[in-house]
Image (cartoon, rainbow, N blue to C red):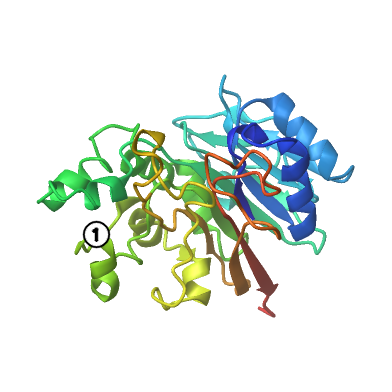
């Protein structure tokens, strides 16, 4: 499950209780959290889910990304920052079982031992939110694709393309990918941008006439050979758009009396690479009760402005 928890539940009444409630309803093995504002918040949420659940977050002053699980972290229990890591041949098996790796400012990764004996490499990701691509794509004054792509790649590490490049070229992540036949790899999170699989010739009329190869998802699929689990299960982009943005942000903003439509799109993902696992179901989740849009959202039962994404996997009989 990947779940943007919208400022640690602070945008609705009893938000942290509701975050825990909906994780318990789904009862996933592992959850990638985004918008984790502090360790105290994720600690409280994890305690509300149940005593068997544990958590991991980054070490920065604003960690933002966390991982919670009802299984066993194979680490020392606290994330540590590693850059320019020099791996030995033995490290190529993976990066060891005593450390958790943070990759730059966008992702954290760890190994988790599931109760069925399978170890997985799990990475939680939250890419930059600024210069949201669909805003430019739907602007009638934008006439060149280069104008849209300037928001995806500004030449630095602090944009979506740069952050994804930082991940896929990270030595520890590459070691995990190279060993994915033995240890399945997951990258889950809020990419704050659409998929290149979704903006093609089939539905360009719904996207302002544009066909866009959004670089973050494209890098992950082409450079790391990972698979988008939702789109694997739901290949028809017209029948199953899978929009995760947004549950409540339907119009923006109050300056226009909430009459300007907010572009809706699929920006939250569960990617995987493994010969041992096969996705059997993937769906978006926004709770079981009707959702009231902003500005009347405070009492919503579901606490996020993003739909969560959930994918079920079967273990294959592989010799």
Image-based side of 302 in relation to 205, left or right: right
Residue 302 in the image: x percent, y percent? 67, 49
Residue 225 in the image: x percent, y percent? 42, 63
The count of marks equals 1
- The quadrant of the picture occupied by the C terminus is bottom right
Q: Residues within 10 Å of mark 1 (few under 14, many from 20)?
A: many
Tell me where residue 181 sits by quadrant.
bottom right
Q: In this picture, is 196 found above or below 47?
A: below
Furthest residue in direction top, as rendered: 61
Residue 288 in the image: x percent, y percent? 71, 60
Tell me where residue 278 sits by quadrant.
bottom right
Image-based side of 223 in relation to 20, left or right: left
For disc 1, the marked residue is 212
Furthest residue in direction right, as rendered: 51
Q: Nearer the viewer, residue 261 or 271?
A: 261
Q: Residue at x 44, y 58 (%)?
A: 266
Q: In this picture, is 103 found above or below 315?
A: above
Q: Nearer the viewer, residue 101 or 156?
A: 156
Q: Residue at x 62, y 41 (%)?
A: 5
| SS at badge 1 | loop
Image-based side of 283 in relation to 105, left or right: right
Residue 37 in the image: x percent, y percent? 61, 27
Q: Residue at x 58, y 28 (%)?
A: 63
Q: Residue at x 80, y 64 (%)?
A: 116
Asked whether residue 299 appears in the rendered view, the answer is: yes
């Amino acid at each position: 499950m990947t779940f943007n928890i919208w400022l640690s539940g602070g945008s609705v009444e009893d938000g942290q209780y509701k975050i825990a409630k909906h994780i318990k309803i789904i009862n996933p093995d592992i959850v990638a959290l985004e918008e984790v504002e502090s360790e105290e918040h994720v600690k409280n949420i994890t305690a509300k889910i149940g005593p068997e659940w544990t958590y991991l977050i980054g070490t920065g002053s604003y960690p933002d990304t966390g991982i919670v699980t009802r299984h066993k972290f194979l680490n020392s229990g606290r994330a540590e920052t590693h850059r320019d890591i020099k791996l030995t041949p033995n490290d190529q098996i993976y990066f060891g079982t005593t450390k958790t790796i943070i990759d730059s400012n966008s992702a954290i990764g760890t190994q988790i031992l599931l109760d069925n004996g399978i170890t997985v490499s799990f990475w939680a990701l939250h890419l930059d939110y600024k210069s949201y691509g669909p805003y430019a794509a739907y602007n009638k004054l934008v006439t060149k694709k280069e104008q849209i792509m300037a928001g995806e790649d500004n030449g630095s590490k602090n944009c979506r393309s740069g952050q994804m490049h930082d991940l896929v070229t990270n030595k520890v992540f590459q070691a995990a990918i190279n060993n994915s036949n033995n240890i399945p790899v997951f990258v889950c999170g809020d990419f704050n941008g659409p998929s290149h699989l979704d903006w093609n010739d089939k539905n360009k009329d719904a996207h302002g006439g544009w066909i866009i190869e959004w670089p973050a998802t494209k890098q992950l699929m082409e450079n790391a050979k990972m698979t988008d689990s939702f789109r694997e299960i739901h290949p028809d982009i017209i029948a199953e758009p899978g929009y995760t943005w947004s549950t409540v942000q339907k119009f923006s903003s109050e300056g226009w009396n909430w009459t300007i439509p907010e572009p809706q799109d699929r920006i939250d993902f569960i990617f995987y690479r493994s010969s041992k696992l096969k996705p059997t179901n993937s769906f978006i989740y926004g709770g079981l009760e009707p959702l009231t849009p902003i500005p009347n959202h405070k009492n919503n039962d579901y606490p996020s402005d993003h739909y969560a994404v959930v994918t079920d996997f079967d273990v294959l009989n592989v010799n």
